[in-house]
Image (tube, coloured by chain):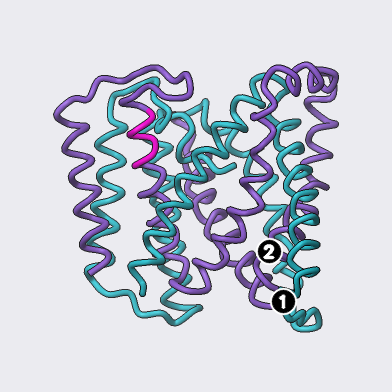
Chain colours: A purple, B cyan
Amino acid sequence: MKDKKILVLIFAMGFMLTYQNVVNGSLASNIGVLESSCIIHLIGMIPSFILFVMYDRKKAHNWKRVFKEKPYSFCGGFIGVIMVALISILVLKIGAFLTAISLIAGQFILSYIIDTKGLFGFKKIKITFRKKMSLVMLIMGVAIMSL
Amino acid sequence: MQVLFILLGIMVGFLLIFLKTFNMILGEEIGVYYSSFMNHFVGGVMGVILVGIFWSIGLKSELNIAKIPWYAYTGGISGAFFVILSNYTMPKVKILTSTILLLGGQFISSLIMDLFFFKIEISWNKIIGALLIIGAVLIYSKKDKKSIIDNDCLKAS
């Protein structure tokens, strides 16, 4: 907590997210959104493979069991390839700022539903007045932004 | 027209939560980095299949490969390193702190990007709306320890 470098790093990670959205959009504007999303995933495989070999090599044998028990958990990549394509469309159409903010709003809304209904095995969370107000505030924000 | 894209952005935000939830479940079983690799692997394979389908039905995009700047290829690398950074930093700070910093970073960087590089005008109502949205997330996150929105929602894939 005292370490200022960590705080700066997290702040910089916000910049990284914008950077990713923008450069992915730039690739998409030259070769098409789906094509670029595919290439981004193929390129990302290289560093993620190196990280996997460095840190998670010992857990590698688990995947067959997980694939049998929870096959849906492997769907992330499928969602990812479509999602990166859609984000590129958004960046090219409405810019990086509105893209980032609408993504945050969407994540909030679904998380709110998951939290309050206790979906997907997450613990149900009590809806306090403060939480209700935050939802109202979010909807107002989206409305004002859409004006 | 813009409203439709904002709504699409909200839908994509839903997808992002699904993606993170699946990756989190997978990460708990086989490790975060293996899960990240699987994510890229499955995404790459599905991407090749989808592009194949689209091309075969005549929806081929125009390819201007010569025009692509080198940095346009670095998004995937940045994404993979984001995983290692969030693993390293997130346990070290309070959830509210990391949320403020991450959202603040996104807010400022995307604003700079639009204003100075894309030369898009950002009107005041967008800034105010965005501040309300970020404020809502922070108010929601305050004090709560175990909630999906705190732990996972705002970290990237």
Locate residue B32, reporting x and y percent: 68, 29
- Callout 1: helix, strand or loop? loop
- Residue found at x 55% / y 36%: B20
Q: Is residue B129 left or right of residue B106?
A: left
Identify the residue under disc 1.
Answer: B61
Q: Residue under mark 2: which chain is it in?
A: A
- Callout 2: helix, strand or loop? helix
Residue A116 higher or lower than B52, as above or below: above
Could you tell me if the residues under marks 2 and 1 are in contact, i.e. CB atoms within 8 Å?
yes
Locate residue B28, reporting x and y percent: 64, 20
Q: Residue under mark 1: which chain is it in?
A: B
Q: Amino acid at mark 2?
A: Leu
Identify the residue under disc 2.
Answer: A34
- Residue found at x 77% / y 41%: A48
Instruction: Name the chief secondary structure element in magenta.
Output: helix
Confirm whether the magenta stretch covers residue B118. Answer: no
